[in-house]
Amino acid sequence: MKILALELSSGQGSIAWLEDGRDNFVRTFANDRKHSGLFFENLQLCSRERGASDAIVVGIGPGSYAGVRIAIATAFGLRAASTAKLVGIPSICAMETAADEFCVIGDARRESFFFGKVSDGRLTDGPSLHSRLELEMKIRESNLPLYASEPLPQFAGATLAYPSARKLAEMARVQIDELPEPQSLEPIYLRAPHITVPKVAPMTASKR
């Protein structure tokens, strides 16, 4: 099976192509506004060298909302021109770590953080939102290796690591028969969307 994996949930993006169980194409690159074109440059190179895939797997976060949305939109565009199966896997399940069981934390903004626990490539707890004090308690209770894909000086025990397209592809190869193909893919939302309601202009008295 030919599997294309796209991962853009953190500051390090990656693309991988797995064919017959072997990594035939793996690229990592900076993933931010200054380097936004690197993803498409590497994807174009992969497409030229490898052609169409049988399956496309996307890391769906949590992490960079914009990055995950770009990866999802690209996957749907590629799938429209092929018969590839499209699946999504939480990005934090594909962290490049030496541990089979570990925890992942991240900054969820608004003075909150997320927590997730991964066992054998599957999310077994979370991702859930916590205050700093709540997260410190979760970390103590878990007593597992701790990783984050961005520096978090508040949590000195967290080791810097990034989700990997290569690991996503390998996970998809093993789990492909049990992963349902969704009608649509959405990033993992840590909280409900914040909607700002426009203010209603005050009524003014009509002129006579």
Image (spheres, rainbow, N blue to C red):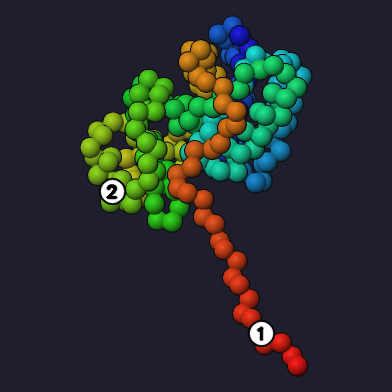
The quarter of the picture where the N terminus appears is top right
Q: In this view, does 119 lie to the left or right of 34?
A: left
Residue closer to the observer: 91 or 98: 91
Mark 1 vs mark 2, CA separation in Å: 49 Å
Name the residue furthest top. 20
- 10 Å crowding of disc 1: few (<14), some (14-19), many (20+): few
Residue 159 vertical placement versus 205 (above, below): above
Asked whether the viewer can see residue 78, the reply is yes
Secondary element under disc 1, as helix, strand or loop, is loop
Which amino acid does the dot numbered 2 rest on? Glu
The quarter of the picture where the C terminus appears is bottom right
Which amino acid does the dot numbered 1 rest on? Thr
Spot occupied by residue 28 in the image (x, y as percentages of width and height)? 60, 29
Image point 55% across, 8% down: which residue?
A: 21
Image point 23% across, 39% down: which residue?
A: 140
State the mark number for residue 160: none
Residue corresponding to mark 1: 204
Spot occupied by residue 98 in the image (x, y as percentages of width and height)? 39, 22
Residue corresponding to mark 2: 134
Spot occupied by residue 174 in the image (x, y as percentages of width and height)? 48, 12
Image point 63% across, 76% down: which residue?
A: 201
